Amino acid sequence: MKQRDMNRDWISTARTLSEALPYLQRYDEAVVVIKFGGHAMGDAEAMDTFARDVVLMRQVGVNPVIVHGGGPMINDMLDKLAIKSEFVNGKRVTDAATMEVVEMVLSGRVNKRIVQAINAQGGRAVGLSGKDAHLVTCDPADPALGLVGVPSQIDPAILHTLFRDDAIPVIAPLGAGRNSETYNINGDTMAGAIAAALKADRLLLLTDVDGVRDAEGHVITDLTADQVRAMTADGTISGGMIPKTETALHAIAGGVRAVVILDGRVPNAPLLELFTDHGAGSMIRA
């Protein structure tokens, strides 16, 4: 690379940092909950990029909380162990044998991989699940689905303790029942409940799509809760986007300032959303 090109790159980097200053000030000490899943979880380079982003966020004063999924990894392990699943209305029935695998994969393999990636980039990540420190208490989502739960009570005290210690919580989507059962929780639902309990400034739902699209297929960068309801009613929002927008609406109703649905395959997507004019994905506000 010629010296002139190198100088141009350095100037561009300095300008980017300068332009980010108002956003760095804006998010100082803010809580940002990130639902991490999809393509980025299975790609080593994408995982490292995500981990660097999270460490940088903490370094500049943001309090990030990571809630992760792990469906494909659970499916792989069930197949290896020859544990067959039953489905009700397209949803997996989680019996006791399946729950053992779910907990092993989510709290073990997946959670610790994310923790190690963040720590390798200089962060101080701590892995836990909703069962730890009474973080998440669950009720059954549907008796027909077995040990699938929905959060009914969140005690975020352990998360505030970790914030004070400059640690980054990485949470597996499991919770405890009122009789000490273990429940599997949808990752988006878990992230929304955690964000609401923390009154988070932002909930970022990383997905494998660009965001919410209008009837012509264009990504809408800014929506209100009322617009989301109307687009769901007329069928513009459909399929797999409905659970994500429902999570967004519940989180906003619970006190989250804004929810962003964005493409986790885009390098540095969380940083683009938080620290640039451009942003990323679709932001939903009250």
Image (spheres, rainbow, N blue to C red):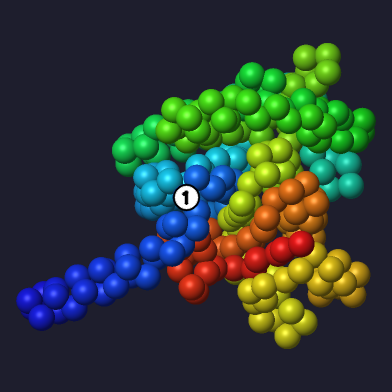
Give the quadrant of residue 19: bottom left
Residue lying at the far left in this picture: please name it. Answer: 3
Residue name at image x 32 percent, y 65 percent:
17
Amino acid type indicated by mark 1? Asp
Residue lying at the far bottom in this picture: please name it. Answer: 216
Residue name at image x 48 percent, y 30 percent:
164
Give the quadrant of residue 18: bottom left
From where the camera sits, is residue 111 visible? no
Image quarter (top left, top right, bottom left or bottom right) of the N terminus: bottom left
Is 94 drawn above or below residue 274 in the view shown? Answer: above
Image quarter (top left, top right, bottom left or bottom right) of the C terminus: bottom right
The residue identified by callout 1 is: 28
Q: Residues within 10 Å of mark 1 (few under 14, many from 20)?
A: some
Q: Position of residue 275 (x, y in %)?
A: 45, 63
Q: Is residue 273 left or right of residue 35?
A: left
Q: Secondary structure at mark 1?
A: loop
Residue name at image x 37 percent, y 45 percent:
59
Q: Position of residue 212 (x, y in %)?
A: 69, 70
Q: Is residue 271 left or right of residue 188?
A: left
Q: Position of residue 245 (x, y in %)?
A: 76, 59
Q: Position of residue 29 (x, y in %)?
A: 50, 45
Is 200 drawn above or below residue 154 in the view shown? Answer: below
Give the quadrant of residue 115: top left
From where the camera sits, is residue 155 visible? yes
Q: Is residue 153 left or right of residue 190?
A: right
Q: Nearer the viewer, residue 121 or 276?
A: 276
Q: Nearer the viewer, residue 208 or 137?
A: 137
Q: Nearer the viewer, residue 84 or 265?
A: 265
